[in-house]
Image (spheres, rainbow, N blue to C red):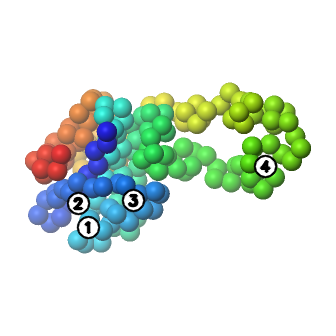
Amino acid sequence: MYFAALLARTEDGWEASDTDLDDVETLSDLTELAREASADDEETVLVFIEQEDSWFALVRLDGEDDPRIYVSDAAAAARSSYGEILLTDELLGRDPGSDDDLDDFTDLDGTEDGEPAAAAGFDEDGDEGGETSEEAVPAGPIGDLHILADLGMSQKELLSLTEDALAEIADALGASEVLETVR
């Protein structure tokens, strides 16, 4: 079960709205959704995403700047469709072109033309031998540890958050009442 909300910082304080992520397929889609929640292009918008005590994420947009992302547990998020949206190559420190465009040289089963699956490093099912997507993603927090520093929450406080992390963040921001209205 997921919970997602948008918090927009306005002249009058924080405004919250719950959000439906069903149509969000990419980080660009999420960024666009968050920017639409802002009445002013210069406002700070935070996207809260949480999966039942498993992991949470924050996406911060400040005007037209690129989104800043923090994920509390990358390995747990990697098993989630919403987490996969956030775990970009850049966030994971991967070179987006490091696959060397192998898709151009492989058949649908993942082997080169005429090459047995085992010789290409794949098991009988066509899966890469030994490495799963969870293994390629580090366990624990990843992303911008200073995402909320200027809003009153230090890196140490962010890393020490517990099961009710989003409520603790909202409390530190002075937005707990508005967040509760959409929960």
Q: Amino acid at mark 4?
A: Asp
From the viewer's perspective, is residue 99 above or below residue 55? below
Q: Amino acid at mark 2?
A: Ala
Does the residue at mark 3 contact the one at mark 4 (Cβ under 8 Å)? no
- Name the residue carrying label 4: 107
Q: Are marks 1 and 2 in contact (CB under 8 Å)?
A: yes
Q: Which sits in the foreground, 53 or 67?
A: 53
Mark 3 / mark 2, whichever is N-terminal? 2
- Tell me if residue 142 can be seen: no
Query: What kind of element bears circle 2?
Result: strand
Q: Are marks 4 and 1 in contact (CB under 8 Å)?
A: no
Of tags 4 and 2, the one toward the viewer is: 4
- Distance of mark 1 from mark 2, alpha carbons? 6 Å
- Distance from disc 3 to disc 4, alpha carbons, whole Å, reads 31 Å
Q: Which mark is residue 23?
A: 3
Name the residue that disc number 2 marks. Answer: 8
Is residue 151 in view from this perspective?
yes
Q: Residues within 10 Å of mark 4 (few under 14, many from 20)?
A: few
Q: Which corner quadrant holds the N terminus?
A: top left
Element assignment for label 4: loop
Picture coordinates of residue 73, whole percent (x, y)? 42, 34
Name which of mark 4 and mark 2 comes first in the sequence.
2
Q: Circle 3: is it few (<14), some (14-19), or many (20+) Cα within 10 Å?
A: few
Q: Report, in whole angstroms, how far the alpha carbon at label 1 lies from the one at label 3.
A: 19 Å
Residue plotted at (78% across, 49% down): 107
Marks 4 and 1: which is nearer the front?
Answer: 4
Mark closer to the chain start, 4 or 1: 1
